[in-house]
Amino acid sequence: MIEIERKFLVVSDDYKTESFSQTRIIQGFLNTNPERTVRVRLKGEQGFLTVKGKSTDNGLKRFEWEKDISKTDAKALLNLCEKGVIDKVRYEVKKGKHIFEIDEFFGDNQGLIIAELELQHENETFDSPVWLGKEVTGDAKYYNSQLSQTPYKIWK
């Protein structure tokens, strides 16, 4: 239930040819309080309800609880969410023993591409793909909950 994750910006679209999977994701937040976010996600034909706790100071670890819900329930809950729906396509790329999840955002976050990597422990090494850019782990503005409130399009 403790997630260890690193986040990076993506510097090219080479990941698209390397991906073995791509899925459209629509998600909203019932609560965006950094102490505990509550997310509703429609990933393809499956719904999910996720609760995340506050990140550690370095941004690497936080509590995460997720439950499968029906597509119907997810659609109903999305209607109750705070403003700012996230629309993205997730690509999955295997590098060595790890799988990178690369999110290409649309709508108000168009132009932003973030790669995430879940690890077993904080100091775990991994193969770094050529398209991996600056690390943004722990930078709260890149959290989906924050992107829903302060989207990428208004950063510039």
Image: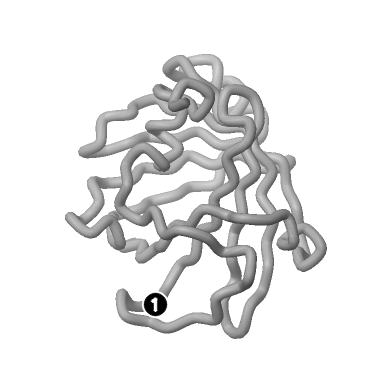
Q: Residue furthest front?
A: 156
Q: Nearer the viewer, residue 76 or 151?
A: 151
Q: Position of residue 102 (x, y in %)?
A: 61, 55
Q: Residue at position x 25%, y 51% from top?
A: 55
Q: Residue at position x 45%, y 58% from top?
A: 134
Identify the residue position indicated by label 1 in the image: 120
Q: Residue at position x 33%, y 29% from top?
A: 32
Q: Residue at position x 28%, y 61% from top?
A: 61
Give the residue type that dot 1 points to: Gln
Q: Position of residue 155 (x, y in %)?
A: 44, 26
Q: In the rendered image, which quarter contains the N terminus?
A: bottom left
User: Residue 71 occupies which quadrant of the picture?
Assistant: top right
Q: Position of residue 50 (x, y in %)?
A: 43, 43
Q: Is residue 39 above or below residue 8?
A: above
Relative to 154, 104 lies left or right:
right
Q: Residue furthest right?
A: 17
Around disc 1, counting alpha carbons within 10 Å, would you say few (fewer than 14), some (14 to 19), or many (20 or more)? few
Q: Residue furthest left?
A: 57
